[in-house]
Image (cartoon, helix red, strand yellow):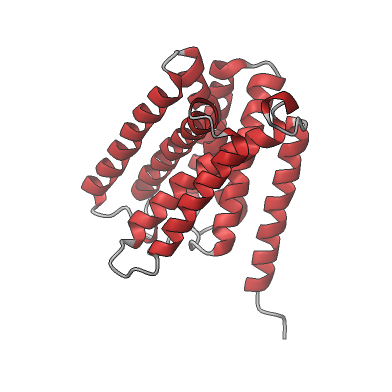
Amino acid sequence: MSNASKVPAATLAFWVVKILATTLGETGGDALSMSAGFGYLLGTAVFAVVFLVAVAFQVRAKTYHPALYWTTVVATTTVGTTLADFADRSLGIGYLGGSLLLSGLLLASLVAWYRALGSVAIASVNTPRAEMHYWVTIMFSQTLGTALGDWTADDAGFGYLGSAAVFGGLLAMVAAGLLWRRCSRTALFWLAFVLTRPLGAVVGDFLDKPLAKGGLDLSRVGASLMLLLAMAGVLWLTHRRATPPAT
């Protein structure tokens, strides 16, 4: 059994890439389900296969590999986007109903993980069993974030930019909680992880939704490629800074 966590440290670069990845999940998910005409159910099936394959490779890996890890995260955001849209729209339970259902599933996932292994801290993700709990929890958190972002932007009437301000403000409050020593760092991590998803969802919608709905009407494929390049750039810069110069 490995003692090294296969999850990257929650640095500023981690959160920047996480937001880019969740935004990419929104535009990428919409590109397949809407632009390519796959629909929500078939789109979910396609992305679910990608997600399962990525998780299998991630679990088999012996150490942390940035490209593999973030590919798996993007896979959870894309399947989360189409799955949430299917539940909210095709099943007719609405954004609020979807958010409540997925909140319950996320909480159940965290409770099951804690009862099985005694910790939900990211530092404990160093065994295949812990990783499986970790990725199931992430998938539920990403799906919840999509439904929550849609509810805030549409039903609650905040719009895309207003919703981005709301979730950005909540993330700032979570960051401020780091200054309070009595706050659980694990709880703050998962709060931030959940909140970055609706932030990415509403930013993704702002990029590709029509002008009449408050978006920029960018190509979903073009926006996805732009976000992918931005992710790669941040990861490359992070790796370059972490690599000591040759002597």
Quadrant including the C terminus: bottom right
Q: Residue at x 46, y 33 (%)?
A: 148
Residue 180 position within the rendered picture, expressed as x and y whole percent measured from the top left: 34, 68
* 61 lies left or right of 228: left
Which of these two is toward me, 77 or 152? 152
Q: Residue furthest bottom?
A: 247
* 194 lies left or right of 35: left
Residue 205 position within the rendered picture, expressed as x and y whole percent measured from the top left: 64, 33
Q: Residue at x 43, y 61 (%)?
A: 5
Which of these two is toward me, 96 or 241? 96
Residue 188 position within the rendered picture, expressed as x and y whole percent measured from the top left: 38, 56
Counting every numbered tag in the picture gives 0
Residue 185 seen in the current view: yes
Q: Residue at x 62, y 29 (%)?
A: 29
Residue 53 seen in the current view: no
Q: Residue at x 55, y 39 (%)?
A: 163
Eyeballing the image, is 47 above or below 15? above
Quadrant including the N terminus: bottom left
Quarter occupied by residue 139: top left
Which of these two is toward me, 128 or 186? 186
Residue 234 position within the rendered picture, expressed as x and y whole percent measured from the top left: 68, 59
Which of these two is toward me, 29 or 216? 216
